[in-house]
């Protein structure tokens, strides 16, 4: 297998990054170490063991050597890589849910593998290529177990504090511990792993001393040019027309599919904050493939297909593109001429779509929902909505704010409430739908909805009395930014202890609580005192 390495090393030696010293023996040692770890994971009885090992080997070459190839030489490196292993284009390891024959196909797996194996990782790539999103997704399972803490150093970090940070990094990666200056104790950090992100900007790369780089596995996250994207999308319409009973022809499918491709190409050609989208291309590809493969979603007209494609593209690109705040107009600016050039019909961007699994033929795909159908999806049980507030008549509530982001917000709140978390904090700009989301959740769970704003201590106390004496479920929506300081203190007492301070209850209220609790079925054998009823 070592014969495969020479051509890649030649490209790296002649086109190395000017700010990173290239040392083939060091890279080869890292390569062999990394490959050994992967080969241990492979099954010895697998008939494709040798082919998989070669692919792993070539991929490891790309991680350890491709990171130091400068930007202009990346096409040359890719050509050499494909000549060595042309099967990278079609192997399942590199095409499952990701892009093709590229290190970005398995960046997420690599980061999680190195992190769990207690190895330091340094992701190198252009600004906006997706390093942060790769890392976030890769470490998601670890963060769920409270094993990850993110520490960010901004561009305005002072030179003194940054020097101290470098010293801490050096202590940890060199001696696996930290010397505490105050207590004069040595603290061993055997489970601490660095996952660093470095831009290709020379000043950003050089901030970390070259001597420390030997402690990091370097992963290159290259960009994917528009030509490669077109190649990935090229076979989709043909596949759909051949295998799905669609009433539209190949030309129509291919024309509609031009829209997301041209949007990506236009984004690459404009100098916004970042010309890249915050997602992997394979994920987006799966969205459109699911859309076009849904057999029961038999497009009855060209405008129907165009409407769905435009809506899904807007959902994928507008909400997940790394634009500046002042560049909110960018999506419409990019798509307007494309829409005119393709002669698309008008469409309704407020249509709600859901991912449905069709049991008749076993094919999944996206299907549109009317407002009434969405209400039927979200409401469960016999009681339906219990909104004791005039706002339930608002059109935004009655139509469930039909766009996918609102659905995601509702599901997040539902998951939080069902995960034994009694309280949920909703953060967001004014008008983004925090209140409407809570009203929808109240309807889904058949909970009573109570709203507390400025002077609402009496409402809060009455609600707590009702909850305690009738054992009913309530959702209290609190506009925290509108409350006074005293009201916030009372609210925090409720969050921590489950009730307001007992001194705030009057004598007759305590008597009412005691009498009511005697009538509850679970407390019939008890005769609680006033102190117990607090």
Image (cartoon, rainbow, N blue to C red):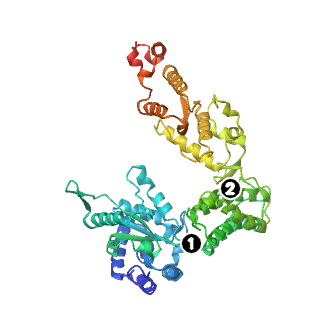
Residues packed near mark 1 inside 10 Å, few (<14), some (14 to 19) or many (20 plus): some
Residue positioned 53% across, 40% down in the render: 481
| Residue 250 falls left or right of residue 157 | right
Foreground pick, 507 / 199: 507
Residue at screen point 41% across, 13% down: 525
Q: Residue at x 42, y 78 (%)?
A: 65
Question: Would residue 227 be found to the left or right of residue 483 on screen?
Answer: right
Residue 435 lies, in percent from the top left, at 60, 39
Q: Position of residue 57 (x, y in %)?
A: 41, 75
Q: Which residue is mark 2?
A: 294
Q: CA distance from mark 1 to mark 2?
A: 28 Å
Residue drawn at (45%, 18%) of the image: 522
Helix, strand or loop under label 2: loop
> Could you say whether the residue bearing mark 1 is in a helix, strand or loop?
loop
Nearest the eye: 288 or 40: 288
Identify the residue position indicated by label 1 in the image.
224
Res. 171 image quadrant: bottom left
| Rendered image quadrant of residue 438 | top right
**Residue at the limit of the structure toward the left, as seen here:** 184
| Quarter of the image with the N terminus in it | bottom left
| Quadrant location of the C terminus in the rendered image | top left
Rendering quarter of residue 325: bottom right
Left or right: where 172 falls relative to 374: left
Q: Position of residue 395 (x, y in %)?
A: 72, 39
Where 507 sits versus 31, above or below? above
Q: Which numbered disc covers residue 123?
A: none
């Amino acid at each position: 297998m070592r014969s495969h390495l020479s051509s890649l090393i030649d490209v790296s030696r002649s086109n190395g990054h000017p700010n990173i010293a290239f040392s083939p023996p060091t890279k080869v040692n890292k390569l062999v170490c990394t490959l050994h770890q992967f080969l241990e994971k492979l099954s010895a009885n697998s008939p494709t063991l040798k082919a998989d090992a070669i692919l792993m080997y070539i991929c490891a070459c790309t991680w350890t050597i491709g990171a130091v190839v400068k930007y202009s030489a990346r096409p040359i490196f890719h050509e050499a890589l494909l000549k060595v292993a042309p099967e990278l284009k079609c192997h399942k390891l590199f095409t499952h849910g990701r892009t093709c024959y590229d290190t970005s196909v398995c960046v997420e797996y690599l980061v999680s593998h190195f992190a769990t194996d207690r190895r330091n990782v340094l992701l190198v790539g252009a600004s906006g290529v997706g390093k942060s999103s790769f890392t976030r997704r890769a470490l998601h399972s670890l963060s769920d177990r409270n094993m990850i803490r993110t520490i960010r150093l901004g561009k305005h970090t002072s030179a003194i504090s940054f020097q101290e940070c470098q010293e801490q990094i050096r202590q940890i990666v060199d001696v696996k511990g930290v010397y505490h200056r105050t207590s004069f104790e040595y603290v061993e950090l055997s489970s601490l792993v660095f996952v660093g992100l470095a831009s290709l900007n020379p000043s950003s790369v050089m901030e970390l001393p070259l001597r420390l780089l030997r402690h990091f596995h370097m992963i290159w996250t290259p960009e994917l040019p528009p030509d490669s994207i077109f190649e990935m999308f090229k076979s989709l319409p043909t596949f759909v027309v051949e295998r799905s009973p669609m009433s539209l022809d190949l030309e129509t499918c291919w024309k509609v599919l031009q829209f997301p491709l041209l949007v990506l190409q236009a984004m690459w050609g404009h100098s916004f904050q970042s010309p890249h989208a915050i997602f992997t291309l394979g994920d987006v590809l799966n969205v459109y493939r699911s859309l076009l493969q849904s057999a029961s979603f038999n497009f009855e007209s060209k405008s129907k297909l165009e409407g769905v494609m435009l809506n899904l593209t807007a959902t994928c690109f507008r909400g997940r593109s790394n634009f500046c705040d002042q560049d909110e107009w960018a999506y419409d600016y990019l798509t307007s001429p494309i829409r005119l050039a393709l002669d698309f019909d008008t469409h309704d961007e407020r249509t709600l779509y859901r991912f449905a699994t069709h049991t008749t033929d076993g094919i999944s795909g996206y299907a549109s929902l009317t407002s009434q159908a969405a209400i039927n999806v979200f409401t469960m049980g016999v009681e339906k909505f219990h909104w004791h507030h005039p706002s339930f008549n608002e059109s935004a509530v009655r139509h469930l704010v039909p766009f996918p982001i609102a659905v995601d917000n509702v599901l997040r709140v539902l998951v939080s409430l069902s995960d034994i978390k009694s309280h949920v904090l909703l953060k967001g700009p004014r008008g983004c739908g925090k209140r409407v989301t809570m009203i929808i959740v109240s309807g889904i769970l058949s909970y009573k909805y109570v709203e507390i704003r400025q002077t609402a201590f009496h409402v809060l106390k009455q609600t707590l009395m009702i909850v305690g004496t009738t054992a009913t479920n309530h959702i209290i929506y609190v506009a925290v930014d509108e409350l006074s300081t005293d009201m916030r203190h009372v609210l925090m007492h409720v969050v921590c202890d489950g009730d307001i301070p007992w001194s705030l209850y009057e004598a007759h209220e305590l008597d009412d609580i005691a009498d009511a609790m005697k009538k509850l079925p679970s407390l019939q054998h008890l005769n609680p005192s006033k102190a117990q009823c607090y």
